[in-house]
Image (tube, rainbow, N blue to C red):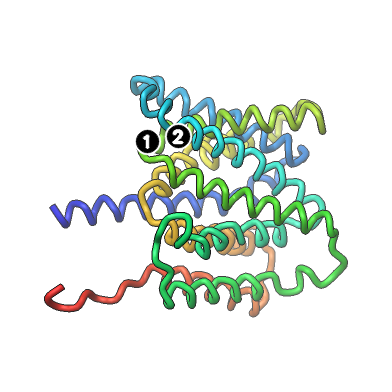
């Protein structure tokens, strides 16, 4: 039974890591789409929400008792998700994708530092050291990104995105009865409503060109629908410190994918940063062997 439990736990870790890797390919798809950021997010939430909701209904529908019991964190999580993406894409335009992404990913680190208060999880010296490695790795990766003039508004919006990302993690750690598929569908649907209101007020409804449709479909179905199913399934079943540290696989993979497929060169200092972030994530997950007799 113990081996079976460990096997199931490993599956949740794999689901979360796969989600991070899929998210890391977002930049490859967005590079071929000319719509405004909020309009792209609208398609992501629309297609992803429809796909996951259809799967839930095909499998018998939502667990109404579980959804009612956890309605508040589900609703708050969906709002946080939609607002996070709105703020993040606004920061993309005010700063640049790399810097905005790196600032956004201070969100999981906020959760890591606050996990003893929020989830009563012990913050060991090893995990503090891991957090420092990740932070230093982010500094290395940022490199000369911030070398030029920066928009103060952009920095503020990016930090707001980081706070919303942290809130998303916290809200979803309070969801246990509603399964990953159902919670992902509900939160994407809620996020769609939030983003739709924003787009109607700020940019207007989008009309994509024919050449943008394939990328939008993949972005919505795979990078949003499938990826968020894996993301929520994993997030709800692994410790908060694991969620915080393993989340950094996404920005590292995004840099690597950009270098491989978009021919964006990585400097030696950025490569060092990637190594430090992955090393910090592994260190944070390392467990000392239990002493004999315990």
Residue denoted by label 2:
183
Q: Would you say 203 lies left or right of 270 here?
A: right
What is the quadrant of residue 38 in the picture? top right
x, y percent for residue 117: 47, 59
- Taking the spot 40% from the left edge, 38% from the top edge, the residue there is 180
Point 59% across, 72% down: residue: 135
Foreground residue among 253 and 152 = 152
- Give the alpha-carbon distance from disc 1 to disc 2, as whole Å: 6 Å
* Tag count: 2
Q: Give yes or no for contact between labels 1 and 2 (Cβ–Cβ under 8 Å).
A: yes
Q: Where is residue 57 in the image (x, y as percent from the top left)?
A: 41, 20
Nearest the eye: 156 or 121 = 121
Q: Count residues near mark 1 (Cα–Cα under 10 Å), then give few for <14, some for 14-19, many for 20+.
A: some
Res 257 visible: no
Instruction: Please name the residue shown 60% across and 41% down the image.
Output: 80
Quadrant hosting residue 288: bottom left
Q: Is residue 70 above or below residue 63?
A: below
**Placement of 36 over or under 238, stated as above or below:** above
Residue 248 in the image: x percent, y percent? 53, 62
Question: Quick one: SS at disc 2?
Answer: helix
Q: Name the residue under label 1.
A: 179
User: Alpha-carbon neighbours of circle 2 within 10 Å: few (<14), some, or many (≥20)?
Assistant: many
In the figure, 289 relative to 218: above or below? below
Q: Quadrant of the C terminus?
A: bottom left
Mark sitting on residue 117: none
Under circle 1, the secondary element is: loop
Where on the picture, by quarter, is residue 287? bottom left
Q: In this orientation, which residue lies closer to the viewer: 115 or 79?
A: 115
Point out residue 70 in the picture as x, y percentages from the top left corner: 43, 33
């Amino acid at each position: 039974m113990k081996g079976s439990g460990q096997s199931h736990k490993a599956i949740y870790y794999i689901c979360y890591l796969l989600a991070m890797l899929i998210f890391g390919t977002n930049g490859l798809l967005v590079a071929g789409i000319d719509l405004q950021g909020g309009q792209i997010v609208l398609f992501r939430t629309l297609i992803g929400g429809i796909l996951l909701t259809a799967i839930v209904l095909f499998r018998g529908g939502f667990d109404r008792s579980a959804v009612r019991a956890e309605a508040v964190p589900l609703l708050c999580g969906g709002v946080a998700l939609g607002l996070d993406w709105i703020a993040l894409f606004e920061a993309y335009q005010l700063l640049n994708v790399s810097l905005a992404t790196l600032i956004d990913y201070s969100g999981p680190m906020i959760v890591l530092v606050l996990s003893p208060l929020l989830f009563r999880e012990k913050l060991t010296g090893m995990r503090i050291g891991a957090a420092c490695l990740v932070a230093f790795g982010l500094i290395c990766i940022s490199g000369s990104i911030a070398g030029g003039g920066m928009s103060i508004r952009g920095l503020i919006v990016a930090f707001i995105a980081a706070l919303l990302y942290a809130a998303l993690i916290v809200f979803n750690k309070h969801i246990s009865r509603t399964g990953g598929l159902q919670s992902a569908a509900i939160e994407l649907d809620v996020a769609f409503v939030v983003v739709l209101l924003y787009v109607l007020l700020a940019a207007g409804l989008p009309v994509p060109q024919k050449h943008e449709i394939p990328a939008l479909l993949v972005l919505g179905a795979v990078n949003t629908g499938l990826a968020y199913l894996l993301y929520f399934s994993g997030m709800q079943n692994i410790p908060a410190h694991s969620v915080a540290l393993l989340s950094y696989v996404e920005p590292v993979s995004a840099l690597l994918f950009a270098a491989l497929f978009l021919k964006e060169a990585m400097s030696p200092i950025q490569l060092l940063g990637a190594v430090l972030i992955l090393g910090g994530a592994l260190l944070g997950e390392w467990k000392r062997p239990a002493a004999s007799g315990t």
